[in-house]
């Protein structure tokens, strides 16, 4: 949220190019940030969903016009795990002179990502999901040739080119990505996050993806065999790293699974989210369904 706010504060909203196009399925925290810039002249444009799980790519493209300043995209929707086809949307945005900001919080660490191929001008994410780094540590990618264009109003002494000279205002921004700094950073958060990041890098996201696809396919197949609803795309190329399984009574049952130390999540409209990672085994998938069958029968 803070990094998105920093990006928004770098842009000029006092002109006709003030549109912020974002999906109705965007994670709420990001929409809160960008919608708040309405009071500074931003004009949010919310692209609707028909099913609460996906949005047609062309619908997002059609929402972009010459007045669009920013296109804010998810790489995957948190409600369904569906991957978004970012590249053609980014292509159209760039044709019309808009900036493309991609939230890759839902995919980094489990889906191989090439920010250049995606067409991202900015990519933002955090550490406590697939990167196993705990909360409170986020990160920002900015296309290098755009760096000098950004002079954030959300700032602090660590963004200065010479922070330890303690110069008075006005700000002289650092030439590097430090220009997005604010106050004294949370060093303990970085220390906690690093081992998770190092582990993911050591294993390799491609190997993690291969393992995850096999286990999520098994999850989907075993759920369908039981007549349960799978709200995640069945095609591995169209989903991130988890499977959403829904049925009557799923919300209270997911709490009982957690009590048995089977750690899953629940989202309205999606169901129980089961998220195997590099450390998850086939036998643990079997154990999940054994417990699910027993609890549903009881």
Image (tube, helix red, strand yellow):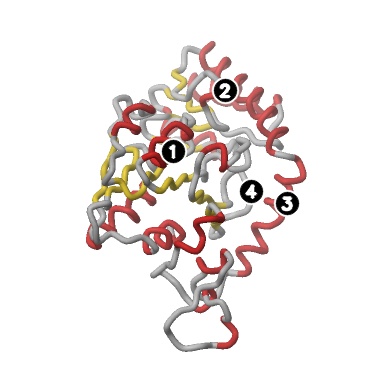
Between marks 3 and 4, how big is the CA–CA gap? 10 Å
The mark nearer the N terminus, 2 or 4, is: 4
Disc number for residue 132 = 4
Which residue is drawn at the image coordinates 48% and 48% (left, top)? Answer: 121
The mark nearer the N terminus, 3 or 1, is: 1
Q: Quadrant of residue 187?
A: bottom right
Callout 1: helix, strand or loop? Answer: helix
Which residue is drawn at the image coordinates 46% and 35% (left, top)? Answer: 86
Between marks 3 and 1, how big is the CA–CA gap? 30 Å
Disc number for residue 210 = none
Between marks 2 and 4, how big is the CA–CA gap? 22 Å
Q: Which residue is mark 2?
A: 236
Q: Position of residue 11 (x, y in %)?
A: 36, 60
Between marks 4 and 1, how big is the CA–CA gap? 29 Å
Q: Position of residue 36 (x, y in %)?
A: 28, 58
Between marks 3 and 2, how big is the CA–CA gap? 26 Å
Q: What crowding class fits label 2: few (fewer than 14 Cα within 10 Å), some (14-19), or many (20 or more)?
A: some
């Amino acid at each position: 949220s803070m990094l998105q706010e920093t990006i928004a504060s770098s842009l000029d909203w006092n002109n006709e190019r003030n549109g912020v196009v974002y999906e109705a399925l965007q994670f709420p925290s990001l929409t809160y940030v960008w919608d708040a810039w309405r009071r500074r002249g931003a004009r949010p444009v919310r692209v609707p969903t028909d099913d609460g799980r996906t949005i047609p790519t062309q619908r997002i493209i059609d929402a972009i016009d010459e007045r669009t300043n920013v296109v804010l995209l998810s790489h995957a929707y948190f409600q369904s795990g569906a991957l978004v086809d970012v590249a053609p949307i980014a292509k159209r945005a760039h044709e019309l002179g808009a900036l493309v900001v991609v939230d890759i919080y839902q995919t980094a660490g489990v889906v191989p990502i090439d920010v250049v191929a995606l067409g991202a001008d900015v990519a933002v994410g955090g550490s406590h999901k697939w990167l196993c780094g705990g909360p409170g540590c986020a990160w920002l990618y900015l296309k290098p040739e755009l760096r000098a264009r950004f002079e954030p109003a959300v700032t602090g002494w660590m963004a200065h080119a010479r922070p330890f000279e303690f110069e008075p205002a006005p700000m002289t921004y650092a030439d590097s990505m430090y220009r997005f700094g604010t106050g004294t950073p949370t060093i303990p958060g970085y220390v906690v996050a690093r081992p998770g990041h190092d582990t993911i890098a050591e294993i390799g996201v491609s190997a993690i993806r291969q393992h995850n696809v096999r286990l999520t396919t098994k999850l989907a197949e075993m759920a369908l065999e039981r007549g349960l609803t799978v709200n995640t795309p069945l095609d591995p190329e169209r989903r991130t790293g988890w499977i959403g399984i829904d049925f009557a009574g799923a919300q209270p049952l997911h709490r009982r699974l957690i009590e048995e130390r089977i750690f899953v999540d629940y989202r309205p409209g999606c169901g129980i989210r089961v998220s195997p990672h590099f450390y998850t085994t086939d036998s643990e998938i079997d154990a999940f369904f054994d417990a699910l069958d027993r609890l549903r029968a009881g």
